[in-house]
Amino acid sequence: GGGRDQLREVFRDQGVVAIPAGCTGAQMGGWLKKEIKTPEDLRGLKFRIAGLGGSVMAKLGVIPQQIAPSDIYPALERGVIDGAEYIGPYDDEKLGFGQVAKYYYYPGFQEIAPSSDLLINQRAWDGLPKSYQSMLEVASAEAWAATAAKYDVVNPPALRRLVAGGTQLRPYPREVMTALYRASQELYAELGAQNARFKRIHEHWDKFRLEQVQWFRVAEDSAANFVAVTTSQR
């Protein structure tokens, strides 16, 4: 869909070659000490979240907190923050978040398909034989696929263990998700007005996403939803 070329363009200005090399899959919406029933419930919350996700939530009154992963647990325990998002069940369980926050929300609007990139100095990359460049790209693609597959395997049992241990699994209400979506569109429009490259890349991505959603709705999503509903009735 042209995403790799767009990624390369952004990093080229920094003298870096970026190659996608890992993916943790769709992330969770985060841990909270109280239930979220309406967008108003988000107002004033101190929530650990970074990047554009934090900027989106700030539009709904959340106070984004930049906290290192190792500091999330004590910050929740001491009440320094009201909630936090990290990755997903497998990683969150290891950090013990279920012991200091009762509610585990989904979906993770902020990182539906995160990608970790291998960053290589442009001059070093240019100095490599083409065969070595190809090897790195193939190995990175394999690492991306293997990581995504691993998380698909380890997240389900981790989520079951969390729920068995007392974690309350909650979906973000549709009203909240709609408010987050509208806030995100507002943010993208603002960023696009300030940065022509952001606007161009976002429009390219948005067009591709719409085409993919149309296909997935017909094929994979409809099949997955049918299987999910049918098997839950057994």
Image (cartoon, rainbow, N blue to C red):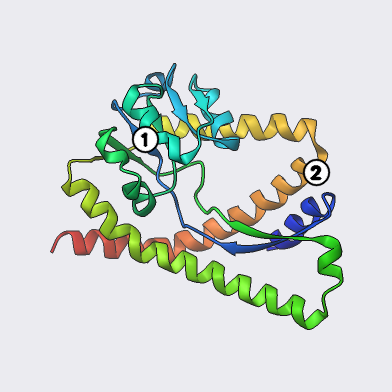
Vertical order, 173 against 148 (above or below): above
- Residue drawn at x 52%, y 54% is 113
Amino acid at pointer 2: Arg
Q: Quadrant of residue 142?
A: bottom right
Residue type at the position of mark 1: Tyr
Q: Quadrant of the N terminus?
A: bottom right
Q: Earlier in the sequence, mark 2 or mark 1?
A: 1
Q: Find residue 197 and report its horizontal and vertical position in percent.
A: 80, 43
In the rendered view, does 16 fall on the left or right side of 87?
A: right
Q: Secondary structure at mark 2?
A: helix
Side (left or right) of 38 relative to 98: right
Compared with 211, 189 (above or below) is above
Quadrant in the picture for residue 100: top left
The image's mark for residue 122 is none
In percent of width and height, residue 47 lies at: 45, 28
Residue 29 appearing in the image? yes
* Residue farthest top in this picture: 44
Badge 1: residue crowd in 10 Å (few <14, some 14–19, many ≥20): many
In percent of width and height, residue 161 lies at: 21, 52
Q: Residue pushed farthest left?
A: 234
Q: Is residue 170 visible?
A: no
Neighbours of disc 2 within 10 Å: few (<14), some (14-19), many (20+): some
Q: Nearer the viewer, residue 200 or 48?
A: 48
In screen coordinates, is 39 left or right of 180?
left
Tag on residue 197? 2
Q: What residue lies at 52% left-to-right and 70% top-to-bottom?
A: 145
Q: Residue at x 76, y 61 (%)?
A: 5
Residue at 43%, 68% in the rendered image: 149
Residue carrying label 1? 73
Across and down, in percent, residue 234 comes to: 13, 64
